[in-house]
Image (cartoon, helix red, strand yellow):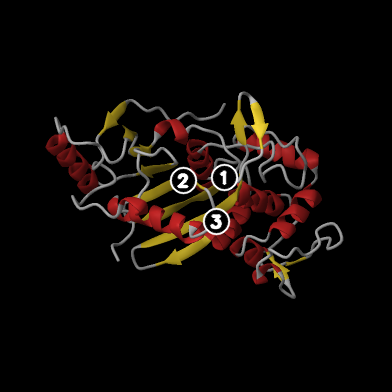
Amino acid sequence: MKKNINIFSIISTLVLSGFTTSLLASDKLCLASNNDCTFVLLSENISETVSEIIDENLNARTGDSSEKVMQTSSVSEANEILSIVNEARAKERLSPFSTFKIPNSLIALDSKLITSAKQSLTYDKEKYPTEAWWPSTWQLSEYNLAAAFKFSIVPIYRQIATDIGEETMKTYIENFTYGNEDISSGLDNFWLNGSLKISAIEQIEFLQKLNQGHLGVSQQSLDTLKAIMLVETTDNYLLYAKTGTGTIDNMVNDETKSSTLKLGWYVGFVENSQGVHYFAFNFSRNSYNNMNTERIEIVRNHLRKAGVIDQP
């Protein structure tokens, strides 16, 4: 049965997202006022110091009539604290796009299709011919899993999914309870604005089960996956993450309409002295301009304000 994260209280903005009263520029945070984004943060094994700061902020903000910059839902249970900006959007299932490279890589590793992050990989160049918009990092002389994950090389992962096979892929996705578990739109593209959908909260649930070893896969597979997910190492924390971007369809009067709306994801987790902090962010934009860097900036701003990563 899929684990549900229960939300039992709504608290004001600066509880988890603000250990300082100063706010960054509005375009650098996910705000409730425009509902074009969501940010979810689940922190487990929170220290007493952080809990005290949260309590102080709650007491200080009680009765505050000023406009809320962010709507944050919070749950504190079994040493876990959940913070959500824009709860309705956080529950909305959307295409995972390249964030699916996390489970796709894990399935390939656990099924022994790929045995190491440095294993040489190829793809069918006739089936997936080079396109004009491909970045130079997709046109390397050699490929391996670490590079394919880092540079989000779509043709490599379409080939990986094909080689995994429909039956094996379906079994793993169902065992992972990943989103709506629907791969029916095509084995090599179901996560690219296809049938597979997942919400930001479900991304958090998946990442937590992954990191806690509750997905029924080998430890070696998990260790290899975490190695390729690691994007930043400091004296105080380790940051594991994956981006995802693509064009999404609009639903108008129960009909799917062509759209130019872009969806951007950034999901992952941070390990620090306080515990593990799982995050999922998505937002919508009308173009790709600045989307790639903006989503990472927004997430890092939230993580800094929550005390999860260091201030610059």
User: Is residue 112 visible in the rendered structure shown here?
Assistant: no
Tell me which amino acid carries mark 3. Answer: Tyr
- Helix, strand, or loop for circle 1? loop
Q: Is 219 drawn above or below residue 37 in the view shown?
A: below
Quadrant of the frame with the N terminus? top right
- Helix, strand, or loop for circle 2? strand
Q: Earlier in the sequence, mark 3 or mark 2?
A: 2
Residue tagged 2? 280
Q: Relative to residue 155, is residue 16 drawn left or right? A: left
Q: Residue at 22%, 45% (x, y): give it.
A: 48
Q: Which mark is residue 288?
A: 3
Q: Earlier in the sequence, mark 3 or mark 1?
A: 1
Q: Is 262 drawn above or below residue 85 in the view shown?
A: below
Q: Which of label 3 and label 2 is nearer to you?
A: 3
Q: Is 254 drawn above or below residue 123 in the view shown?
A: above
Q: Which of label 2 and label 1 is nearer to you?
A: 1
Q: Residue at 13%, 35% (x, y): give it.
A: 59
Tell me which amino acid carries mark 1. Answer: Leu
